[in-house]
Structures are given as C-alpha cells and as structure tokens.
Image: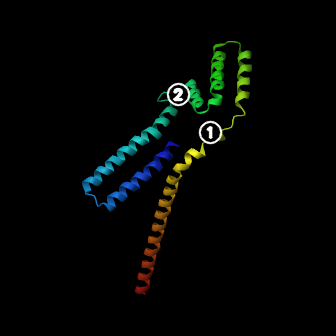
Amino acid sequence: RGLLVWGVVGIGPWMAISAGAFFLRLDSSLRLALLVLYLLAQLAVFFVLVLGPWMRLQGWLPRMSRKEAARRIGTRIPEIKDKLLNALDLSELSDRGISRDLVGASIEQRARWMHPFSFVGLISWQKLRPYAWVLGLFVAVLVRVWLSVLLSSVRSMHTIYLAGVECN
C-alpha cells in the first residue's frame, strides 16, 4: 500500500514541477534546484511509507504491541474498544497459566460479542466527498496525457506514411 501511495503522490508534484518549469521558462539552475528538492522529498516519502513498514515486517524495527494496536483500533471503533482490551488482558492471563478453562470461556464470550460488528460504517463517505475532485482531476490529467500521446503518434505515423508514398 505504501508503494502505491508513494507512486501516486509522486506523480502529481512531478507533473506540477514539469509544467511550471516549461511554462515559466525557468533558468536551468532553478530547474535543477526543483529537481533536487523533488527527489529529496520523494526519497523521504519512500523511506516513511515503503521502507519503514517493510523494515518493521522484517523485524529490523520495533513493532507495535498488541495493546497499542487495540488502543488505536478502539479510538476508531469505540464500540469494541473495551471488549478488545479485555480479550487481550484475558489472553495474557492465559499465557501466565491462570485457569486456562475459565480464561478460554471468557475469551470466547468476548469474541461472540465482537462478531456481529459491521465494518461498513467505519468509512464515512460524506467526509470523503469533498476530496473527490482530486480523483477527478487526476483521471482527467491522465486521459489528457493519454490522448495527446495517442494523437501525436497517429500524426507521426501519418507523416511517415506520406513520406513513404512520396518516395515511391
């Protein structure tokens, strides 16, 4: 996911910098400075969004504890916060050797309470609606670039064809 976000986030600024450099006819030193700044920003984003999570998965960086994960999930989904933390506490008690049958029954009870939870309500489409224009703009730019490349290739093929006809 981080690789995808890094790629998408990288395309927009690159297009803006390229268009700005082209239309403003910037000096070569300014273009170089913009390129270096862009590459440094992309490198930083790559380390944060791609290499950081990958290094955590490899075990080279510390991972988040289960309790911390439960707290973070609980802040987003308050309906299951207490149940999730209780289930984690009970599983820790079970690991210490305290009455495994009692702890197992309690964990099963907590799991049944959490089972009917619906994740559909987590995404608030109303909050995302104001940002839909960004997706529309991105698609419009991609279609425009695709059409311009397609038309230029058709024109160049037509020119090549006409040059071949004149030779014969």
Q: How is the image coloured?
A: rainbow
User: Under tag 1, what secondary structure?
Assistant: helix
x and y percentages locating residue 38 in the rendered image: 36, 48
C-alpha separation, residue under disc 2 versus residue under disc 1: 22 Å
- How packed mark 2 is, by other alpha carbons closer than 10 Å (few <14, some 14-19, many 20 or more), is few
Residue 36 in percent (x, y) is at 32, 48
Using the rendered view, name the quadrant where residue 159 is placed: bottom left
The total number of labels drawn is: 2
Q: Quadrant of residue 105?
A: top right
User: In what quadrant of the picture does the C terminus appear?
Assistant: bottom left
Residue at 39%, 55% (x, y): give it.
16
The residue under the point 69% across, 34% down is 117
Q: Is residue 47 left or right of residue 30?
A: right
Label 2 residue SS: loop
Query: In the image, is 31 to the left or to the right of 159?
Result: left
The three-letter amino acid code for the residue at tag 2 is Met
Query: What residue lies at 37% left-to-right and 44% top-to-bottom?
Result: 41
In the rendered view, would you say 52 is above or below 71?
A: below
Q: Which residue is mark 1?
A: 122
Residue located beneath label 2 in the image: 64
Q: Residues within 10 Å of mark 1 (few under 14, many from 20)?
A: few
Give amino acid for label 1: Leu
Q: Is residue 94 left or right of residue 142?
A: right
Q: Is residue 41 above or below residue 29?
A: above
Q: Are marks 2 and 1 in contact (CB under 8 Å)?
A: no
Q: Earlier in the sequence, mark 2 or mark 1?
A: 2
